[in-house]
Amino acid sequence: MIQNNNNSCSGSSSSSSSNSSSSRVVVVVVVVVVVLVVVEYQRQQHGATEAAVKAVIIVVDVVVVVVVVVVVVVVVVVVVVVVVVSVVVVSVVVVVVLVVSVVVVDVVVVVVVVVVVVVVVVVVVVVVVVVVIVVVVVVVVVVVKVVVKVVKLVTWLQAAERLSFTMSSRSRISLIGRL
């Protein structure tokens, strides 16, 4: 009977991980399709270089939005889990203190339990603060890297556009293709 329960738990965890990975694949496919459609539309409406610049800007917007949404979800989940765990731990400790103080009136035991509760609360607060700081730093680093890449690419494309007056459209497209 116990083995069946373990097997069902492992099956549910593997199915949840496959669900999350399949949802990631769906998100990536949707982003790629949207970018391809936008690039083709911009290419038909404007020149190839302008289409490439606009496509890069759209990709950056999508990436930044996805990163921010994922980070917010992760932070909310972590904070909720930490708060729930700390509330459960503090509740259990308070119940134990009440039972101990009713059964055995010992000041030392009560003081020790109160100190443990305070330490648990402080540790929980520190963990939450550290997690939030790490998440904010990761988001800032990712956004800065993306922005720097886009600025470099747009600058390079603008320089290529200035040179394009002396290049044929076929050379210009092959130059963009090398990016």
Image (cartoon, rainbow, N blue to C red):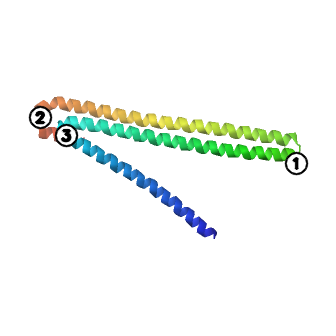
- Which residue is depicted at the point 32% across and 34% down? 150
Q: Give the quadrant of the C terminus.
A: top left
The front one of 153 and 94 is 94
CA gap between label 1 and label 3 equals 81 Å
Dot 1 lies on which element?
helix
Dot 2 lies on which element?
loop
Q: Which mark is residue 103?
A: 1
Nearest to N terminus: mark 2 or mark 1: 1
Q: Is residue 117 visible?
A: yes
The kind of residue tagged 1 is Val
Nearest to N terminus: mark 3 or mark 2: 3
CA gap between label 2 and label 1 equals 92 Å
Left or right? Give the position of 36 relative to 1: left
- Which residue is depicted at the point 40% across and 33% down? 144
Left or right? Give the position of 70 relative to 48: right
Q: To which residue does mark 3 refer?
A: 43
Residue 125, given in percent of the width and then of the height, sits at 63, 36
Q: To which residue does mark 2 refer?
A: 167
